[in-house]
Image: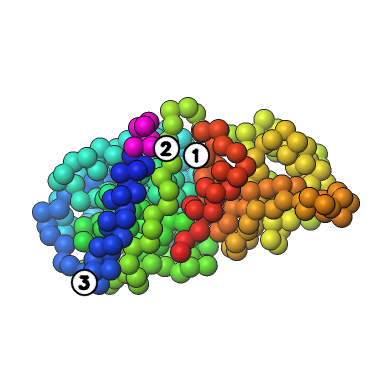
Amino acid sequence: MGEGQALHKSTRVLAAAMLLAGTTLHAQPVEPTATSQVRILATGGTIAGKGNAAGTSYRSGAVSVDDLIAALPGVDKIARVTGEQIANVPSSDMDETIWRKLHARALEAFADPDVAGVVVTHGTDTLEETAFLLSLILPPTKPVVVVGAMRPSTAVSADGPQNMLDAIRVVTSPASSGRGVMVVLNDTIFDPRSVTKFDVNRVEAFTAPSRGPIGHVLGLAPRYFGPPQPQPEMLALGEAKLPRIAVVYAYAGQTEDEVRDIVRNADGVIVAGVGAGGVSSGARKALRALADKNIPMVTTPRQGHGDIRRSEPTPAAKSDDDDRVPTIGGRELTPAKARILLMLALQQRRTFAELQAIFDRAGTTN
Ligand code: ASP
């Protein structure tokens, strides 16, 4: 059995045990103990931004992890916090190198029996991509909270310190056992599969349009709305460079050439389609050429909200009657999250049916 398979199996057993225990765990939030250790892995973003007091002009990723921790009043009464600067970038610059470092450092923290869990500080713009990625490649053995802020650290009423304290409270709470990776902002706890940033200005920037949040942080502890959900199937982060996935954003009148330019040299394609995943007739011609070359394509809604299933032409239909291109259904994932899942899934050679099965399992929550 390979390392990835072994990890996957033991994780499933553990997740099942945690799930059984979950009904009692979620009911009674327990006060955290100040002896728990929490590892902060800092990557930058507005939460580490510095600028004017109005918060209108600032530079992301300018404050160190030590300064972020120093700005948390009373944190020593919640946990012993240690920090590591993984990167200090605006989250639009998050990349494979940083993801790999985060993954490795989180696994090291998991292996330390003194560590209760991990908090990742992150820019909000692509926070949901990193949170979803980590939820697929980390075992749910310890809680991981990905946290950001909408106002820089120097703003009047900066939201970063409160969000970080909440994240530390979530990580150290026994009620968080078996919940794996979560996102915490603005007193609200989200599942990484369903969360998305929907407002680019306000503190209430995140939502989970289909499913809603999974809990709130009220006072000193998380209050979950239900027991832990089954964790998504773990995927191995192989050593090979992640494949190149192109994203085709569909719009009215998109031409074949416009799509051809975007998908050139792609190992896989995410279609952010109109409505329930539609594309123009020009785009369809370009995508059909890719299907003929067996390039896997995943359909998602460009609105980022809905459930899209596998699409295949009906066998008996002539192409004029049914000119659908065979695509994997991205289920409830946004185009950006579907890209993450396809990158990981394509690290191993997979058939169309296997890819669809992976999207069916990881692309929805129960
Ligand atoms: N531009 C910032 C980033 O994602 C936005 C934020 O953190 O809110 O890094």
Residue, disc 1: 344
Q: Residue 186 appears at what percent x and percent y?
A: 37, 66
Q: Which residues are magenta?
A: 1-6
Give the residue pinned by disc 2: 236
Locate residue 3, reporting x and y percent.
35, 32
Mark closest to the chain's N terminus, 2 or 1? 2
Q: CA distance from mark 2 to mark 1?
A: 7 Å
**Front in this rendered view, residue 212 or 186:** 212
Report which residue position mark 3 lands on.
28
The three-letter amino acid code for the residue at tag 2 is Ala
| Residue in the picture at 12% in, 60% down | 33
Q: Which mark identifies residue 19?
A: none
User: Could you say whether the residue bearing mark 1 is in a helix, strand or loop?
Assistant: helix
Amino acid type, residue under disc 3 in the picture: Gln
- Distance from disc 2 to disc 3, alpha carbons, whole Å, reads 34 Å
Furthest residue to the top?
240
Q: Are dots 2 and 1 in contact, CB under 8 Å?
A: yes
Please report the residue visible at 42 percent of the width from the left and 67 percent of the height from the top: 213
From the top left corner, tell me how far across and down residue 366 is, in percent: 46, 64
Q: Is residue 326 rendered to the left or right of residue 162?
A: right
Element carrying mark 2: loop
Q: Is residue 206 magenta?
A: no
Q: Are marks 1 and 3 in contact (CB under 8 Å)?
A: no
Residue 220, position in %: x, y?
A: 21, 68
Indicate the secondary structure of the residue bearing disc 3: loop
Residue 261 visible in rendering: no
Is ligand 1 within 8 Å of the beta carbon of the residue shown at mark 1?
no
Dividing the picture into quarters, in which one does residue 179 lie? bottom left
Mark sitting earlier along the chain (2/3) = 3
Q: Amino acid at mark 1?
A: Leu
